[in-house]
Amino acid sequence: MLHPVAILCVLSTLLCVCTAQSDSSAPVIQLRLAGEKRKHYEGRVEVFYNGEWGTVCDDDFSIYAAQVVCRELGFIDAVSWVPSAKFGKGEGRIWLDNVHCSGGEKSLAQCESNGFGVSDCKHSEDVGVVCNQKRIPGFKFIRNQANSEEAVTMQVEDVRIRATYSHRKRVPITEGFLEVKDGGKWRQICNKEWTEMNSRVTCGMYGFPGEKPFNPRPYKLLAKRRKKNYWGFSVNCTGNEADLSDCKLGREIQLKGNDTCSKGMPVVVSCLPGRAFAPSVSIGFSKAYRVEQPLVRLRGGAMIGEGRVEVLKNGEWGTVCDDNWNIRAATVVCRELGFGSAKEALTGARLGQGIGPVHMNEVECSGFEKSLTECYFNRDSLGCSHEEDAAVRCNVPAMGFRNRLRLGGGRNPYEGRVEVLAERNGSLVWGAVCSDSWGTMEAMVVCRQLGLGFASHAFQETWYWQGDSSADSVVMSGVRCSGTELTLDQCLHHGKHVDCPRGGGRFAAGVSCTQTAPDLVLNAQVVEQTTYLEDRPMYALQCAHEEHCLATSANKADSSSYRRLLRFSSQIHNNGQSDFRPRAAHHSWIWHECHRHYHSMEVFTHYDLLSLNGTKVAEGHKASFCLEDTQCDEGIQKRYECANFGAQGITVGCWDTYRHDIDCQWIDITDVKPGDYILQVVINPNYEVAESDYTNNIMKCRSRYDGHRIWTYNCHIGGSLSSETEETFPGLLTNQLSHR
């Protein structure tokens, strides 16, 4: 895996130094980036010429000149350039002015200019550049010789853990020699100045929460037999860095013939995997981990190790405000949950908005806390809203999942026929997946395994995608996923005994993936406040009866009899990252003559009344005859309106309201006896539309019915309370209604 790493950074002065590779006609120069309060890949452009450092004027400077500068410094490209001494005023000479580059030059010295030292500029016109963080493969690290006292970060092309002996066969790789790639060659690091903090950071960037002891004897024996090629620098990590590229470069190590290490040996790291990634060969591994409910969790992410950060407090889950949210706090969360360090600390509800209280604000962590709850934070979240919910993306171990699955024939990398690698007759072959019972949950697992985000659609016919003809044969059938699996082969399936009457080819399973997804959440308070009973005559319920909105006893009821209806309003919010749209297109919506409207989803919501032991005693359902933006948060414009057969959906930040007084917005409880019950509402119960989080599609309330009146109380969204509290509400803890 590629780690864009830094080049000479911090404080002030120079960051990057490189000798220009110019032709014989251009003078030999060196470049560096300088300035205060900047990242390692940006800064004021400075040129070393004729024994003296100087700056470059911004007159006529362009993105093409910035590209030349960045590549000369070892970065793959330029992102932008900035005039007017944004990175501070330089000192000394202004070496270049009116620089004109085509972008293809190997050195800034090859570009046209007024000539070295010919300028009418002031240092208030010093130019700066912002480079792409990725390094050019094979670009050799050159330490800043102009100021060797400066603290700099390490800069290499790549880092790897090279496994040996039995560790080679384990997935993930947790132990081996640590090697860095510099100048196109893999090199070992001398262990004389290597510390546990260095190993902690290394393990974190590879997806492991910490380091562990190892037996050095076999590595010493192996090191004696191998040719050594040491990297010439030591590394100095404090332990709270998220990546080795954030660590400071230690002193330069004097190597004799590049093969000695002062009687030391190459660095070996041994990492402790989190519970989800423990090697199967580990005996008794699970006993080392606590199984009680954690105090922190992630929600709304497409991949394992990413999501909105939620914290359990006083039995209720709440979110974290993004004020002061940074990579250190994110890393504490990631390590607490059994992942490595954080790749990203996300702000502004980038992975969707949560519900309930905001438990933490202005979090400050040192990076060594065992839990986010040990960090300093402000309990007063006044001024914070769910639009500021913090999220993380964590480093996770490389499991090789993507090598066993591929999409074929799609118009882009995010769609195609699903093809899996399976063993047949002693050989590994690519084959298709049977589309019988193939649905959204299975597609979600495929997209996750390939790192493509969420599922957009699941296809049971793929004749329009020309996949690999050699992979037409079905090698996997009977696939049924819960949606949380990391790989397709973790789902239930028939194994080697394939049974697929439809066959593969044009009837093979397919998917399309997307980086974002909607997230529907019911407003529990609205349900609790609007619940009431109505007795209605059968003659006024003919359309509802036709659409199966009444109990089965209504089939034998007299037209003059009454039905007792438990009525309430429902307000459904989209808290996700993309609009909620019906799966069916306009042309396939179903017309209902009695009510004179179309249904874009035949079952959009299930309404159930359960006994206290979880048995269903009454039920109802609601079709989506009109999905639209009833209201939106401030600043968000409505997109969907049902009038005149318009487009249906719910925009992010908007909600759709089904009032208590419309047909089928009820549960028929005519046959229910007085007692205590649980009212349960499930949105999108058949997973017709993919969402980022299905656990919050459920709402449950306690209800008491005395035969004349009904009281509804303690309404809450599924997963919003602690597991102990949820156990007092039998029924669904997750959205697992569908029987496909």
Image (cartoon, rainbow, N blue to C red):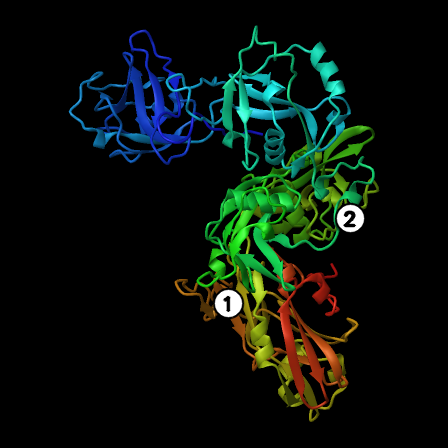
Neighbor class of circle 1 (other Cα within 10 Å; few <14, some 14-19, many 20+) is: many
Residue under label 2: 492
Q: Quadrant of the C terminus?
A: bottom right
Q: How much space separates mark 1 and mark 2, taking CA atoms?
A: 36 Å
Amino acid at the residue labelled 2? Leu
Residue 489 in view here: yes
Asked where in the image residue 709 lies, by quadrant, the reply is bottom right
Of pointers 1 and 2, the one earlier in the residue sequence: 2
What residue is drawn where x is 55% and y is 10%? 255
Residue situated in front as seen by the camera: 197 or 123: 197
Secondary-structure class at tag 1: strand
| Residue 153 drawn at (x, y percent) | 47, 27
| Residue 156 drawn at (x, y percent) | 51, 23
Q: Residue furthest bottom?
A: 560
Is 56 displayed left or right of 571 in the figure? left
Residue 655, which numbered label? Answer: 1
What residue is drawn where x is 61% and y is 70%? 623
